[in-house]
Image (tube, rainbow, N blue to C red):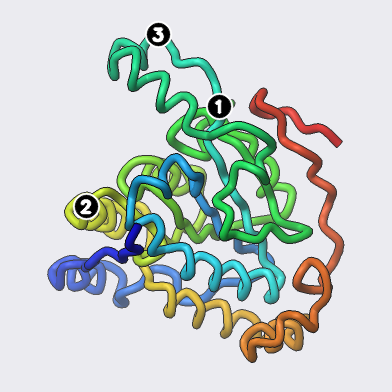
């Protein structure tokens, strides 16, 4: 399957609207890496085997993950749960499609279900959700894990841009988090769907930035980071010198394996 990237854009009138409102194009002009989490939403075979745009964003997500880890931030892999369809979803989708979506998370442990091109590092977060949003109360293991690390900013990537990613962004914004949607780090079925999500987010729920812009934000934030030397090794393509886990930062709590019952952890 060919890997594609969306032809994304924010209309000039939307940039002008925000510049008039706040005096600048982008809401969040700086981040603190240690208080920032990259969220990677639903990057599982169910989607990547079907949608060429999901294949296209894999390298950009990996670039951000490597840089943010080295700067002391958190990488959170968020996967859909594998559960029985609800009565409402069966009525809405029909029995066959409802069962298909309910099983979209795949079989096995969370690490086994993630798309094979991604590398999980020590200190990464593995979370599971049973709703479109990774922040919907009682339907995701993610929020308490981020809260425990003092996260105040989330960089949102994954699929689908206009469904699970946008739903996650809306709820994250409601909870008071600083949200940045990575324009070329999210994927939908069509450019039209993707750009509609960017429009909604940029206008009302968060910032929209390219991968290169996000990497610049991480770089600037890392300049004042105590582990700046580790970050520079990644920038220079020498990440292998960092050892297992990608960086030597303050210890992270052991997360264990997330079970299929949302909210439970096995040590």
Upstream in the sequence, badge 2 or badge 1? 1
Residue sitting at x 66%, y 34%? 108
Looking at the rendered structure, which numbered label has been put on residue 27?
Answer: none
Q: CA distance from mark 2 to mark 1?
A: 26 Å
Q: Position of residue 30 (x, y in %)?
A: 51, 76
Question: Relative to residue 134, is residue 247 depicted above or below?
Answer: below
Upstream in the sequence, badge 3 or badge 2? 3
Q: Position of residue 210 (x, y in %)?
A: 38, 73
Question: Relative to residue 115, is residue 58 depicted above or below?
Answer: below
Q: Are marks 2 and 1 in contact (CB under 8 Å)?
A: no
The residue under label 2 is 190
Q: Are marks 3 and 1 in contact (CB under 8 Å)?
A: no
| 224 to the left or right of 16 | right
* Towards the viewer: 197 or 112: 112
* Towards the viewer: 181 or 160: 160
Tag 3: Cα neighbours inside 10 Å, few (<14), some, or many (≥20)? few
| 10 to the left or right of 48 | left
- Corner quadrant of residue 33: bottom right
Q: Which quadrant does the N terminus fall into? A: bottom left
Residue sitting at x 78%, y 73%? 247
- Corner quadrant of residue 238: bottom right
The residue under label 3 is 87
Q: Position of residue 133 (x, y in %)?
A: 46, 37
Which residue reaches farthest bottom? 236
Q: Position of residue 235 (x, y in %)?
A: 62, 87
The residue under label 1 is 82
| 13 to the left or right of 105 | left
Q: Secondary structure at mark 3?
A: helix
């Amino acid at each position: 399957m060919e890997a594609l990237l969306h032809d994304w854009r924010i209309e000039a009138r939307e940039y002008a609207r925000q510049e008039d409102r706040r005096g600048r194009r982008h809401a969040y002009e700086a981040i603190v890496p240690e208080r920032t989490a990259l969220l990677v939403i639903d990057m599982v075979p169910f989607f990547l085997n079907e949608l060429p745009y999901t294949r296209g964003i894999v390298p950009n997500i990996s670039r951000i993950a490597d840089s943010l880890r080295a700067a002391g931030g958190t990488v959170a892999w968020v996967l859909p749960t594998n559960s029985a369809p609800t009565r409402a979803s069966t009525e809405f989708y029909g029995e066959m499609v409802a069962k298909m979506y309910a099983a979209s998370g795949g079989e096995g442990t969370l690490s086994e279900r993630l798309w094979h091109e991604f590398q999980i590092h020590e200190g990464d977060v593995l979370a599971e959700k049973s709703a479109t949003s990774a922040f919907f109360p009682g339907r995701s293991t993610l929020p308490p894990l981020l809260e425990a690390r003092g996260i105040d900013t989330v960089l949102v990537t994954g699929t689908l841009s206009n469904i699970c990613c946008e739903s996650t962004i809306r709820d994250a914004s409601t909870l008071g988090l600083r949200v940045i949607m990575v324009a070329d780090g999210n994927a939908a079925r069509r450019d039209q769907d993707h750009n509609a999500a960017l429009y909604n987010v940029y206008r009302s729920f968060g910032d929209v930035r390219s991968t290169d812009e996000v990497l610049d934000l991480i770089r600037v934030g890392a300049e004042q980071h105590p582990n700046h030397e580790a970050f520079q090794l990644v920038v220079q393509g020498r990440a292998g010198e960092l050892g297992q886990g990608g960086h030597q930062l303050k210890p992270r709590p052991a997360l264990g394996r997330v079970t299929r019952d949302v909210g439970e952890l096995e040590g």
